[in-house]
Every structure is written in C-alpha cells, then in structure tokens.
Amino acid sequence: MSRTRTARIIVTLLLGCAAVVLLVWAILPQRALVVSGLAPDPLTVRGSVHVHTLRSDGTGTVDDVAAAARRAGLQFVVLTDHGDGTRDPDPPAYRSGVLVIDAVEISTVGGHYVALGLARAPYRLAGEPRDVVEDVARLGGFGIVAHPDSPKVDLRWRDWTLPFDGIEWLNADSEWRNEGSLGVARALVTYWWRSPETVTAGFDRPDTPFAEWDTVSQYRRVIGLAGHDAHARIGPRGNWEPADRDLSVQLPGYEVAFRAFAVRVSLEAPLTGDAGRDAAALLASITAGHVYTAIDALASPASFSFRAHSGTRRASAGDDLPVADSAILEADVARVPGVSLVLRRNGRVVAASDSGRVRFEHAASRATAVYRVEAKLPGAPGTPPVPWIVGNPIFIGPSLPRLRPKPRVSPAVDAEVLCEGGDVARWRVERDAASSGRIAAQEAPWAMGHGEAVAFEYALRPGDRAGQYAALVTPVGQGGLSAWTRLSFKAAADAPMRVSVQVRNPRSGARWQRSVVIDPRPQDLLVTFADMAAVDEAPVPIPLGDIDSVLFVVDTTNTPTGRRGTLWIDDVRLERAAAP
C-alpha cells in the first residue's frame, strides 16, 4: 500500500471520528447547572419514591439499590415492588447509610396504585381501582396514583373520581415510553457522556397529571410528587417489559436515575438514625404534603420555599391556612441564571417572576383557594418543557377533607325478600371443576342462638391462579330486577375477605359486579345496581329486565388459591330507594 493511500485512509478515519464526535456533541443534552453558595438544610432530606428490585421486576437487590442511592447522595428510598399487599413489609432499616422503607405497588384493572405505610393485608388487594383505593385507606395506608398518563393502557389510571391520596405528577417510565425508538437511540448515544441529563432529556411537562391534580385539589387534599419507577432495565420492546427480562440491558442504572431527580422532604426534626422512628417521621411529612421535587439534571443542588401568612397565622407548602381574610404568599428558589417562578391558583397562572422570587396577595374570600408553585429553567427539555421544581399546594380558606364525604344512603320505599333465615332450598352452588362449595343452614354469627342463616363453605383449588371460583347463587326470575334499584343483605365471614356480588344475563352470560368487604363482625350491606361494573366485555348499563340470578362469588381476584372458609348470608332483599 502506498504512503499516499495510507495517508488518505488515516485522514478519512480521522474525519469520520471527528464527524461522530461532532454529532454526539450536537445531540448531547444541556449539562446540569451547578448552584453555588447553598448550605445543606438538616431538615430537608433527598430521596426516591417508587423503586423496584429483584423481588418483582427490577434488576438489583435491596442492598444494591441502597448502595446506589448512597452514591447518588440520597438519604432515603421507598421500595415499591409489585404485589397484592399480602406480604409482610420489611421493617425500615438503614442500609449503606440510606433509610430503606418497604411499600408496594398494586395492580388494578384501571391502573396501578402505590401504597405507603400499609401493613399486611388480610386478603389480596386487586380488582377495580375503587376497591383497592378503599382497601388501602381502610387498612391505614396512603395511596398514590402511579404513572397516571402512561402510554401503556394497562398502566394508565382511569378513574379520577376516586379518593386517592396522592399522584405522581411525573413518572420516569411514562416519560420514556413516550419517546419512541428515535429518542431511545439518541439516549443510548449520549448516555455515556451525560447520564443523568440523558435520563431527563426524555421528560416533558405532563399535562394530564397536572390538570387532574389541580382539579381534584379544589375539593380535597391531594399531594403530588415525582416517581422514578426505577427498574434499572430497558428492553427491546419498550421500557422494562416483563417479557424482556432476559434480553434487557441495565440502563439507566439506579444511581444514574437517582442523580437525575429526587424528591425533597421537609422534616420537623433531623433524622436520628433510628430506622423505625425516622421512617414514621418521613412518611408523616410526605402524607402531609411537605415534599417537593427537583430535577437535579437541570440544576443542583436545589432549594425551594413556599409560605403564606395572614395576620399571625402561617402555612408552608402542604398546609392549610384556614382564613377568610386576605393573605400574602411568597415563594423563592435557589438563584440560577434564567430561573422563573409561576404561581398557580386552582391550576391557573396568577403570578410569575424571573427573579427567583414571587410575592402575591390573596384577596379575602370565603371559598378555598389552592396555590402551588413551579420553577422553570431555560433550555429545559420537553414540549412543553419539564419544570425544574414542583412544590405542593397551600390551601387558603376552609379546610378541605382528605377524602370525599360518603354519599347519603336513601331509605328504601319498597322491598322484596329473596331469602330469610336458613332457607337453603333457594340457593345453589356454582364452581370450577376443582374447587368446592357446600350450602348449609347454620346458626348465624349475629343470632346469639336465636336464628339461622345460609352458610356457604367454600374451598378454592390450590396451585397457580387459573380462574378458580366458588359461587352462591339464587334465582330472581327473568325480569325480576326491573322494578328494583339495589340489593341489601346481612353478611359475616370467618375471616376478612372481599366477595363479588354479581348479576347475570342468562342468554349472553354477561355479568356485572360490585365487590364488598365482609368481616367476622356481622354487617348490613347495600349494593346498588347502578354502581356495578361490567365483568370482561359485558355492556353497560345493566339490562335489569334480562337478569335472572344474583351471585355471591369467591374468586382469586381477592382470595388466595387453596383458601377454605365460610360465608354467612341472610335477609337478602331487593329494594327500591327513595329519590334523593
């Protein structure tokens, strides 16, 4: 080979390398700004909520996650492996100097729900979102709507009328599912040079979660935060698909994800090193809304303050200021070139500032006003751009409930008895081939020796969940529900459980259901036909004139396989409620 040809090859290779370097440089995300002059605040701790490990579909052990969090400068991590709430959560513990709190992400048929502070549930938490939200609250947990606007339908939240406690205004998994193949390819190129910035390069300001949060916050208290949804894995068919476990690569790693952004929790006192005590304090602050999120890959470290006062009364982000008088609101963030603040009232912008500080006077009003703040930086990624900092609201005016008040139950104006006492002849059992059910007349738990009820003894086949069920069925005569609006009954069980109360169309086999919690303590229960949801692809609304039977179904939605037990049913009535 001649020297000239060799020289040409070398020059071509050098030019090619230079072109690659220039291309990479051109598509690199903007480097994170470094904020100087900020002293650490011992009452503000950085951490992550919504992290998965090898216990579900993550790639690291609990210790791996804790070590990565320590390297990223976090002080706590809330693990949320997928489950049904029936596993005993690990007690809080310090691992690698990081406070690790065990929680759970529960799958419903209408999205996923992260439950914090939940003890072991007495039965599987699953099924309809309204049932899971109700169970988490009743069992003492705090529920957060996960990835509410996920492009994947199975993950997207679909019922905003429910009394959930919190919402992920941003979820890293959802943001990257929106990017498509081109965005992922670009990220694979730039990740090796600016990893945290690459993670956030796929973020936008997610309009749907913000809009729903702002709407719901006008009638009850809901907290907002960002969730990592960290699995440390990406697969060829999309982010973190279970079927891609063997083909996936461990990108982005836990440490990189934690460096990209973190939630900041404001505590009443510094962490003590006592894991149980610190976890309780941390969860109390999160549930109170004393938390904000900062995208560290835009600028770090971050600081944020949002407060309000009226006379001698004071409030910070997450608090109520229950006054009808005027009030002064003030917010400020760390001084970063180009930073701007936006103050929103009930979701609408009412003030803005380019100085890193905003002051606004709230006019006297008897209505509750909900104010929250977003901080923005020039050059932030996304359309619209993702905010740098998002804080929780201050509620000025009458205090809002955390939950919606329960609707008043209208009295019955007419009723028809379907079953009273131990009338076993009216009932029959339906079940899958390997499960069992038996009907007997037994002394009712509430009768104290003075009456019988129908006792349903069931046993679901052990093994994998494969549609096991056992049902107590009574006929109503075709068209027998036409004149009625609801079903009432008295019930008890030998252990807490959820039972699906169903009605069925005999011609199509279509069913509609509403599940209820039944405890050892006898209860009078109501199921309104209008509240029943379609099972599978059944049409809505229910054609009450075509229904011929009512079923009390024990199945694997909420009952583990292999479970045996007894359910007592009595005083079953069809009712017509008085007009509201």
Image (cartoon, rainbow, N blue to C red):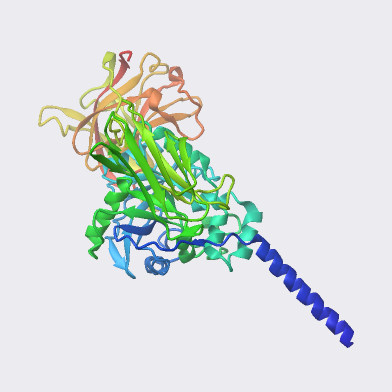
Q: Residue 454, percent across and down?
A: 24, 30
Determine the image quadrant of residue 302. Answer: bottom left
Residue 537 appears in view: yes
In this rendering, position of residue 267 left or right of residue 192: left
Q: In the rendered image, is residue 245 in sight?
A: no
Depicted 434 relative to depicted 200: above or below: above
Picture quadrant of residue 6: bottom right
What residue is shown at x 29% (from left), y 61% (from top)?
A: 42
Number of labelled discs? 0
Which quadrant of the rendered structure holds the N terminus? bottom right
Percent position of residue 292, x then y: 39, 50
Q: Horizontal and vertical percent for residue 171? A: 48, 50
Camera-side residue of 317 and 221: 317
Return the residue nearer the eye: 172 or 306.
306
Quick one: which residue is furthest to the left in this view? 449
Quarter of the figure that contains the C terminus: top left
Front residue of 242/80: it is 80
Q: Which percent across, then down, holds residue 191?
A: 58, 65
